[in-house]
Image (cartoon, rainbow, N blue to C red):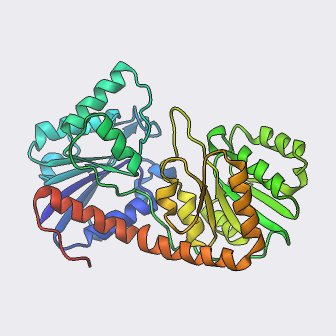
């Protein structure tokens, strides 16, 4: 029996499902630590199927919304009572929470394996204090699960030589993101975008491509952000003001309905000195809805798209325009890519797969044989 203490501040549906799937394995015992928060992504009441779990410990947290300075209001996380073989803290290595957990492990369960998680795929400038925290937590961690290949490369650049498996914390929520029977938004070829309206998301590149493919075409963008007014002005300047709809924020069901009503989703992100796309959740959501995806080559986008979508170099308006023209001209090509995308995410981006990969890695780390795939 492998005893696991799982600490995560975000009690999301997907985190919950992955952990409870792992907890159903008879060879593992799971105790969870979650923030005592009401509402939003940090609500521990979202932890369902508690009968599969040995215990759920709720603790208060300072600065829960701050991924780097948030701190759990507990000294020992229940480590002494749990006597874990492995502590999995879904915290970034440069966070105070990770440092706190590493210190508690060293005092209360020094033989337990410590696993952290990171999405970070860019070596951003750090203050001396943040760099000190990062070095201390990496020295303490027996492994760091990575959300993308860029995170592995960054850890190697920082001199970290222990295991760094790529197991993204996100996956397809298939109960929400599937092809829905909804009316089309227009008789025109309809391009979708879902995400922040911010410079690094490259929506200005998408506007130029939509202008170049010419009518009939419609762009529907869901999301909010500081560039909303500038994008509206750009659309008018390009002569496509009447062909761009900014529909604001949507809940998950609204996103699924929008995706089911467009002909293609575009993810035109551009890298900056301090950021690259770390996963691109809307990619798997669109593929779950059988929508063809065109993504830029920023960060982890090519990994998530695989061979089931189309890619273009960042900020390459001509390449994006050509992809859009080809898809507008061929409904059969759109259907083929939609089918391939759905097959891809159901094979490579599901909570069940993430649970199996994580559990197999736990066993490797604590020295137990990996079981045959279930």
Q: Is residue 180 left or right of residue 177?
A: right
Q: Is residue 349 left or right of residue 179?
A: left
Q: Is residue 116 left or right of residue 191?
A: left
Answer above or below: position of 370 versus 136: below
Picture mark count: 0
What is the x, y in percent for residue 79?
17, 47
Q: Foreground residue, 232 or 264?
A: 264
Answer above or below: position of 96 versus 90: above
What is the x, y in percent for residue 81?
13, 51
What is the x, y in percent for residue 318?
73, 51
Corner quadrant of residue 214: bottom right
What is the x, y in percent for residue 75?
22, 36
- Looking at the image, which residue is at 60% across and 43% down? 270
Tell me the quadrant of the picture where the N terminus can be found. bottom left
State whether residue 124 appears in this view: yes
State whether residue 91 appears in this view: no
Q: Foreground residue, 164 or 33?
A: 164
- Looking at the image, which residue is at 32% across and 36% down? 157
Answer above or below: position of 22 versus 232: below
Corner quadrant of residue 185: bottom right
Answer above or below: position of 164 versus 361: above
Tell me the quadrant of the picture where the C terminus can be found. bottom left
- Looking at the image, which residue is at 33% across and 32% down? 96
Q: Foreground residue, 73 or 118?
A: 118
Q: Foreground residue, 65 or 358?
A: 358
- Looking at the image, which residue is at 35% across and 19% down? 128
Q: Residue furthest top?
A: 128
Q: Is residue 223 left or right of residue 146?
A: right
């Amino acid at each position: 029996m492998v005893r696991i203490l799982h600490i995560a501040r975000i009690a999301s549906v997907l985190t919950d499902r992955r952990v409870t799937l792992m907890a159903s394995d008879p060879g593992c015992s799971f105790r969870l630590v979650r923030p005592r928060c009401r509402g939003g992504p940090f609500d521990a009441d979202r932890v369902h199927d508690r009968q599969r779990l040995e215990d759920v410990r709720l603790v208060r947290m300072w600065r829960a919304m701050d991924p780097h300075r948030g701190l759990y209001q507990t000294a020992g996380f229940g480590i002494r009572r749990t006597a874990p073989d492995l502590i999995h803290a879904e915290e970034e290595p440069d966070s105070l929470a990770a440092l706190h957990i590493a210190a508690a492990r060293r005092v209360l369960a020094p033989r337990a394996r410590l696993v952290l998680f990171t999405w970070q795929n860019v070596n951003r400038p750090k203050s001396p204090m943040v760099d000190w925290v990062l070095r201390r937590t990496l020295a303490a961690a027996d492994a760091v699960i990575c959300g993308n290949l860029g995170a592995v490369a960054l850890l190697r650049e920082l001199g970290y030589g222990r295991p760094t498996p790529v197991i993204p914390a996100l996956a397809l929520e298939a109960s929400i993101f599937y092809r829905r029977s909804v009316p089309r938004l227009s008789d025109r070829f309809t391009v979708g975008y879902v995400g922040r309206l911010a410079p690094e998301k490259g929506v200005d590149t998408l506007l130029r491509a939509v202008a170049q493919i010419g009518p009939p075409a419609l762009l529907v963008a869901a999301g909010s952000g500081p560039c909303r007014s500038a994008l509206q002005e750009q659309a008018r300047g390009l002569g496509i003001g009447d062909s761009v709809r900014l529909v604001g924020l949507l809940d998950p069901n609204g996103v699924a309905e929008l995706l089911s009503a467009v002909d293609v989703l575009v993810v035109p992100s551009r890298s900056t000195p301090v950021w690259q796309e770390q996963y691109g959740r809307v990619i798997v959501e669109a593929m779950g809805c059988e929508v063809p995806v065109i993504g830029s080559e920023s960060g982890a986008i090519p990994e998530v798209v695989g061979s089931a979508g189309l890619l273009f170099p960042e900020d390459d308006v001509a390449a994006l325009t050509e992809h859009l023209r080809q898809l507008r001209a061929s409904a059969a090509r759109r259907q083929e890519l939609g089918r391939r995308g759905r097959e891809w995410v159901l094979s490579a981006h599901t909570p069940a797969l993430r649970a199996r990969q994580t559990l197999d890695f736990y066993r490797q780390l604590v020295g137990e044989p990996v079981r045959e795939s279930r």
